[in-house]
Amino acid sequence: MEQSSYLYEPFSKGFDSEYNSAMTMKARGNEVFNGKYTTRTTAKSFLLVPFTLLLIMLPLSLMRNSHESTPEVSSATVSSSLNNTEIKHCDIFSGRWMHTSRPPYYTNETCHWIIDQQNCIKFGRPDREYLHWRWKPDECELPLFNATQFLNLLRGKKMVFVGDSVGRNQMQSLLCLLSHVSEPEDASHKYSSDVMYFKRYIYHEYNFTLGNLWSPYFVRSSDADPKGHSFNSIMRLYVDEADEAWTSEVEKFDIVIISSGQWFFRPLLFYEKGKLVGCNKCGMENVTELTHLFGYRKAFRTAFRALNDLEGYKGVTFFRTFSPAHFEDGDWNKGGKCVRTRPFSKQEMKLDGYILDMYMTQVEEFVEAQRVAKERGLNFVMMNTTEIMLLRPDGHPNKYGHSQDKNVTLNDCVHWCLPGPVDTWNEFLLHMLDVESKGYYSSKLERVF
């Protein structure tokens, strides 16, 4: 039964080519023992996290004690109306996973949009505990996803996911969440010859289009291995040239959700102004090792700059932060697996190391892009999910993304089971869209709603 958008349930009640770059987590080797995790935070990270978040959250902190004006939305902070006169400010991304007896929104039997790689129940995952945890913000309640509300809110609009297959994972979650209210026409073949990676779904009753534009690096790329493309072959990245596969289409959309991550760990050659400037794990003489963070930073900078510079783009950009992998006992291509059946607590797992580096790199680029966007009358919003998903090692397909009689040696600890924790991203998405559409902020999405 559909829940009203104003009814909140108390939480105390109740593989595809992405493997080409999947990075081991291994729960940081010896740092995990009997479920415990030892933090290893550098001085640089210690200083950067509060500084960057201060830049994002400052407008909120200045307004906490004032009811005379409303703060600008910049990332995690949203508001909910408590009565006719009071607005409560709440960081919906600060909280904890709490057990619930509530069933998932859908199953593999009720949603036909689940692809095999994420269809954990179909392929025999024996446990169901991972389906019974919901995110509980510290200072408020996150509303249940309301499919009718979402479709009415996006009536006449176009929304697109830009990035890699984890972003597509979120889109497929959204298809399932909406499926008990409305089924779309798959019109992908009308827009692209590559219908696996470039999707268009049209909800005719609501005149709403949902799309996916495949661009795991955001920038122009090509194979550099003379033997051709493989799981871990080297690729060229032209880090200052945005990929036309998405930039040529994105102006047609009102809401853009951009994200990427795991592909940047593979061997890469970095080009700027057409010249080779360095690499990541290329092992070539006389080529400077710049690490994956160089490419990651440059790619996000180029992508954000493209959105800010496109003359015809008037939409709202949702930036979803890095989604961690959870490989243990080996790398993604060396027997790594993810067999846990419960979330970590914040005491067991901390945001640090390479995950923190990835997170901070993209957030730093986002902060600057958001500043430029504001000057140009555009709205950039951050969906701050990295630490939240770091706590969910139980949510991946592992070996249950294919028939168990197939000779598949790679486990999937990158993508998320459907149904599963990834559905929470769309709860966040709806709530953030809903809050802004009601005009709680001076920076509301005026061009969209």
Image (cartoon, rainbow, N blue to C red):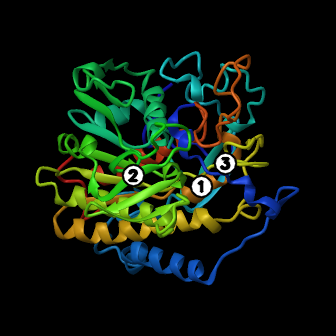
Q: Tell me if 136 is positioned left or right of 213 in this view.
A: right
Tell me the residue that label 2 is attached to: 236
Asked if disc 3 and disc 1 are in contact, CB closer than 8 Å, the reply is yes
Q: Tell me if 235 is positioned left or right of 116 in this view.
A: left
Tell me the residue that label 3 is attached to: 392
Let me know if residue 223 appears in the view: yes
Label 3 – label 1 distance at C-alpha: 7 Å
Q: Farthest right residue? A: 34
Of the residues tagged 2 and 3, which is closer to the observer? 2
Of the residues tagged 2 and 1, which is closer to the observer? 2
Residue 207: x and y in percent read 22, 27
Q: Earlier in the sequence, mark 2 or mark 1?
A: 2
Q: Secondary structure at mark 2?
A: strand
Q: Tell me if 298 is positioned left or right of 289 in this view.
A: left
Q: Secondary structure at mark 3?
A: loop
Let me know if residue 76 appears in the view: no
Q: Earlier in the sequence, mark 2 or mark 3?
A: 2
Q: Where on the picture, by quarter, is residue 46? A: bottom right
Residue at 77% from the left image edge and 43% from the top image edge: 340
167 vs 112: above or below: below
Tell me the residue that label 1 is attached to: 388
**Mark 3 belongs to which amino acid?**
Arg
Residue at 58% from the left image edge and 66% from the top image edge: 356
Callout 3: 10 Å neighbours few (<14), some, many (20+)? many
Label 2 – label 1 distance at C-alpha: 32 Å
* Residue nearer the viewer, 295 or 168: 295
